[in-house]
Image (cartoon, grey):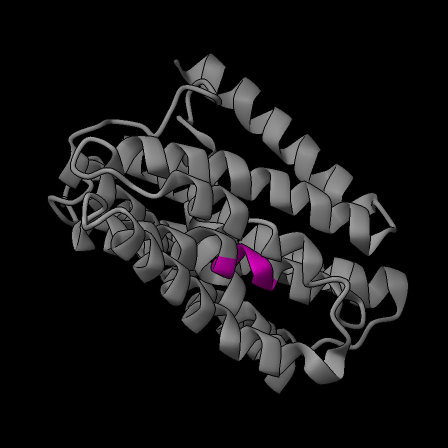
Amino acid sequence: MDFKRITSGFIVCLALLVILIIPSNLITGILFTIIAIFAMDEYLRAISKVCKPIKWIGYLSCIIVAIINFIPEQYLLQILMFSIPTILLILFAQVIATDMKTTFKDMAYTLLGICYIPVFSMFLSLINGMENGKILLGYVILVSLGTDVFAYSVGIRFGKHKFSKVSPKKSIEGCIAGTIGAVITMLIYTFILNEGFSFEYSYFIIGISGIVLSLIGQLGDFSASSIKRYVDIKDYSNLLPGHGGMLDRIDSVLFIAPFAYMLFTLL
């Protein structure tokens, strides 16, 4: 299982590297959309155990991850503000059109998935469109990978104090190590950027941001686990051996993305 996890992890890292290298924001947005569709499919399959989600709306909503690249910046905020009310209107229309065969529960679970996956994924495209967007995406990916690698490596060997029943295998030791590992990874990345490419990023600000984003990413991991516990599954799929499904792999990235965008915008 460890060999499968390492191999799968290497493939994921390689795919992420390709995303960072691709110069076209449009192509990157399309790749993010494909990832969101895979994740949405896993989410919809999972919650199908407890409800009947409105799948076509779930899949269609993933398009927002790509089309965000076509929206002029001056209209971006207005369109985003109206997107959720519009989706909510469509979901209620589905309930009415089916004479309530589609229930409020079905609608609510579907809306949660839309907010969780395509809306959060959209911030990856927004970060990618910023000045030095590829560099900033590197921070998002590294804080997630750094947290995961260090938390897993330390937790599996030294983890004695369980963190939560939501994810029984995770330990307090692993969570602390994950945050430390994320900060170290981000600082090394910053050193390379500053010394090798003449950037002037603050090590202090990057360090603090690393702590915040790592903790948010771990909360995202627990959030995804809480859904799995609720529907009684171990992994969202077996797409990535040793890691589970696409959503298992990007759960922390999804939560990190909007807060990273906010930090990058402010700083």
Q: Is residue 161 above or below residue 208?
A: above
Q: Is residue 92 above or below residue 226?
A: below
Q: Which residues are magenta?
A: 119-123
Side of 232 relative to 45 (left or right): left
Q: Residue at x 40, y 50 (%)?
A: 178
- Image quadrant where residue 199 sits: bottom right
Side of 149 relative to 193 (left or right): left
Q: Is residue 18 magenta?
A: no
Q: Nearer the viewer, residue 224 or 157?
A: 224
Side of 3 relative to 136 (left or right): left
**Relative image position of residue 124 (x, y in whole percent):** 62, 58
Q: Residue at x 62, y 45 (%)?
A: 33
**Relative image position of residue 156 (x, y in whole percent):** 29, 31
Quadrant position of the C terminus in the picture: bottom right
Magenta span main SS: helix
Q: Is residue 249 visible?
A: no
Q: Residue furthest left?
A: 165
